[in-house]
Amino acid sequence: MSLAELRDLFIVIFSLLAIGATIFLLVLSFLLFRKVRSILDSGRATVGNVRDMTSLVSKEIIKPLAVIAGMVQGLHRALEFMSRSSKRKEGTRSDRGE
């Protein structure tokens, strides 16, 4: 067997091994993709559930509490304003010496 024939034999053997390795990697990648896809679908469903729950909590709890807090703060400021203005009126009467 000459050197050229040996070289050609090695080229054919390594080419067949490369094709086999490529097919093996493709099959492995496809199987991995199927597993990961199911995990990603499950993750998307979980994210959708969390999004729905946060939206529900926001609509049903947070917004009404914000409205109530705004009303309480406004009432507090109004009472504070009235008490300041009544103290000023009392202070101006005592300053006159009456």
Image (tube, grey):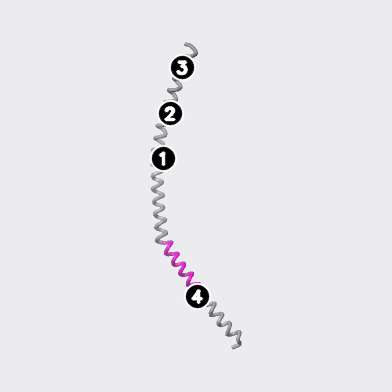
Task: Point out the frontmost of discs 1 and 2.
Answer: 2
Distance from Cα at disc 1 to Cα at disc 2: 21 Å
32 or 7: nearer the viewer: 7
- What is the magenta range? 61-77
- The image quadrant that residue 18 belongs to is top left
Amino acid on which disc 4 is placed: Leu
Amino acid type at image mark 2: Thr
Q: Secondary structure at mark 3?
A: helix
Residue on which the image places disc 4: 79
Q: CA distance from mark 3 to mark 4?
A: 99 Å
Mark toward the start of the polypeptide (1 vs 2): 2
Image location of residue 24, percent across then percent down:
41, 29
Q: Position of residue 85 (x, y in %)?
A: 54, 78
Q: Earlier in the sequence, mark 2 or mark 4?
A: 2
Instruction: Give the quarter of the figure containing the C terminus.
Output: bottom right
- Determine if the magenta segment contains residue 65: yes
